[in-house]
Image (cartoon, helix red, strand yellow):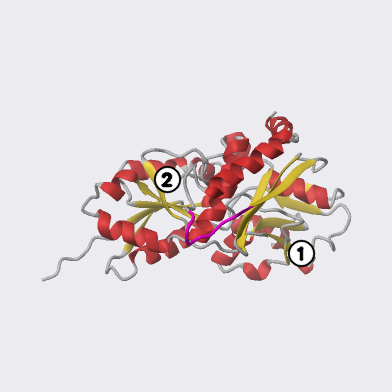
Amino acid sequence: MTATLPPLTIGTRASQLALTQSGHVGAAIVEGTGREVELVHVSTHGDRDRISPLAQIGGTGVFVTAVRQALLDGTVDVVVHSCKDLPTQPLEEITLASIPAREEPRDALCARDGMTLEQLPAGARVGTGSPRRAAQLLRARPDLDVVGIRGNIETRLARALGDEADLDAVVLAAAGLQRVGRDAVISELLSVETMLPAPAQGALAVEVTTAALHGGTAQTAPAWFAERLAAVDDPATRAAVTAERALLRTLEAGCSAPVAAYAEIADGELSLRALAIRPDGSHVVEGTARVGFDLAEDDASGTASIPFLLGSELAADLIGRGAGEILAAAKA
């Protein structure tokens, strides 16, 4: 008789979006192995405090720390995060094992009557909980009244599209809306020229303990575990995300800072564009960098990799042109 294989346990926040993301990733990891997936709900500080601005309650790591602790405690085998929430400083005990193929990186405007950003009336009230989005909205439309909001996807959508809506529009990550089947509410996908995304937006991060990849347990023997994690990883997404997160790390800015970055591979080059912007949108320092890059030959991770160096160098250029002052003022 063949023994029943135990399920792979995945630590995740309990929001609809987090559960959907974790379920899809878990299914991809165990595909063809005969194992099942068990999602373990973990409550984070960011979930418990849904009112305060993210920067006020901790910013970087506010949705990650408790989930990571469940991994370190051995409560779960794997954790899945939105990659843009992940702190840029690595932990020795944890390995970023997989970055699946990125979905839509752009931000989405969800407006009453299907209006676009250009069509919103003067003084329109637009909601977002992101300083990066708020600043770029004001850069594009200084006349807007940008309102800080928090909450899950449905809570935020209701502010603009619900029966008791008090806003004209809200801005959310398009990938999140698509993952939970709510992309029909998008009235406009904002171009990267208008709204440059957050570093790693649209990508997911799969973390495991470093020990599980090398020593293994009854649940996660290294051979099958490492093989399945590698199968889920997308090298092109990892290269782009590595460049974007390296820029964020060099700027010493957290996920709630008014910083944007987007990298992509095309025609044998890895290109990265980024900006730091004042919260009121009145001043921006931006730049673009590119380098020859071959996915078949070049390493896409690590601090000596081409993507990491590209991100670090562009960040240094932005700092030299005043980005540090912008970020310091935003923290004050």
Work out which quarter of the rendered image holds the C terminus and state it.
top right
- Identify the amino acid type marked 1: Arg
Q: Quadrant of residue 156?
A: bottom right
Overall secondary structure of the magenta section: loop
Q: Residues within 10 Å of mark 1 (few under 14, many from 20)?
A: some
Which one is closest to the eye, mark 2 or mark 1? 2
- Give the quarter of the figure containing the N terminus: bottom left
From which residue to which does the magenta span run? 291-298
Q: Find disc 1 in the rendering and name its residue.
A: 112
In the structure shown, which secondary structural element does the residue marked by tag 1 occupy?
helix
Judge from the rendering whether residue 304 lies leftward or rightward of residue 259; answer left or right.
left
Residue 154: mark: none
Image disc number at residue 67:
2
Q: Position of residue 225 (x, y in %)?
A: 30, 57
Q: Quadrant of residue 131?
A: top right
Of 247 and 33, nearer the camera is: 247
Task: Say if the magenta span includes residue 54.
Answer: no
Whether residue 295 appears in magenta in the rendering, the answer is yes
Q: Amino acid at mark 2?
A: Val
Q: Residue at x 67, y 31 (%)?
A: 331
Q: Check the image and report above or below for 195 versus 91.
A: below
Where residue 133 appears, x then y in whole percent?
71, 49
In the rendering, at what x and y percent does residue 231 appear? 39, 63
Q: Within 10 angstroms of label 2, few (less than 14), some, or many (20 or more) residues?
A: many
Q: Is residue 123 above or below residue 318?
A: below
Residue at x 83% of width, y 41% of height: 282
